[in-house]
Image (cartoon, rainbow, N blue to C red):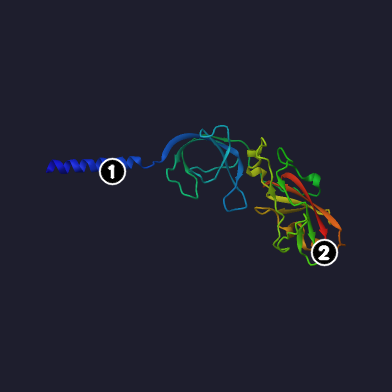
Amino acid sequence: MNRLIISFLLVTVLGISACSDDEPQDAVKEIRMSVSSETGFSSVFGSEQPIECMLVMSEDNPGVWEPLGFNSIEGFTYERGHEYYLSVKRTILANPPADASDRTYSLIRILEDRVVTEPEVPVDEKITSEEDIEYHDLCPFEKYAVSKGYIVDGNGKILYDDGSGSSLPSYDAARIWLEDVLDKGDPNWVKFESVPYMAIYSFVLSPFTDEIRLVRNGSSGPMFKDVIPEDEFARIQSMQSGEEVHYALILANVHKKGLQKLEFTVKKQ
């Protein structure tokens, strides 16, 4: 009887052990990681505003600088203008949270810490003409498109000038939609879809003033009322039927560097 009990317990323990071995385990490894003296920007799910972050390169993806949050390496404090070479413990989670990365990092030791430059304080230069707008690397390029024209009637109703008769929401709720039309066959497609090539701002060139306005784009484009303020909208409503004016948007990235120029007309019905 005792032998039967012992045999049963042994089989049970082995069965539990086998089940435990079948469960996914976290993968832990010590890796080397470089941290740039320059920072970058990363898009965040649910937010229209990219956030500043570190730029790191590890043996997981050599030769590629990738964004990583300032607090993403446990035990490590980043200082601007410093270039680091780190030894970190990288853990690939077997069961990562649905709303977070499957990797965590903790500092083992700092192998190198080199001061490259003193951190610069960004200064917004005043833009007084289109020529003052500095374009980003490889720009301008054709990534975005907007409707080529809008029609405004005497009551302030806004329609697309495409023959469809489709109207926009009210003046306060209307948006100038930016459509991403970049060809996926473009050799720079991956680069152009990264944060530095996202249209975060628009410089507005208006037919009614020489002043160049800077407006924020939402996730899908700037609000109509930000591009065409109330006083200009009232002037359009008072124009003669068939008369039209021309606007231009110079899309800009998070650093306010130009990406692309788009033009459209607004016609009085």
Residue 49 percent location from the top left of the image: 62, 51
* Disc 2 to disc 1: CB gap under 8 Å: no
**In the rendered image, which residue does mark 2 sit on?**
237
Please name the amino acid that badge 1 sits on: Ile
Secondary structure under the numbered disc 2 in the rendered image: helix
- The dot on residue 16 is 1
Front in this rendered view, residue 130 or 154: 154
Image quarter of the C terminus: bottom right
| Dot 2 crowding, Cα within 10 Å, few <14, some 14–19, many 20+ | some
Q: Quadrant of residue 239?
A: bottom right
Image quarter of the N terminus: top left
- Against 238, residue 97 (above or below) is above
Please name the amino acid that badge 2 sits on: Gln
Residue 240 percent location from the top left of the image: 88, 62
Q: Residue visible at 69% across and 45% down? A: 181
Q: Residue visible at 73% across and 40% down? A: 139
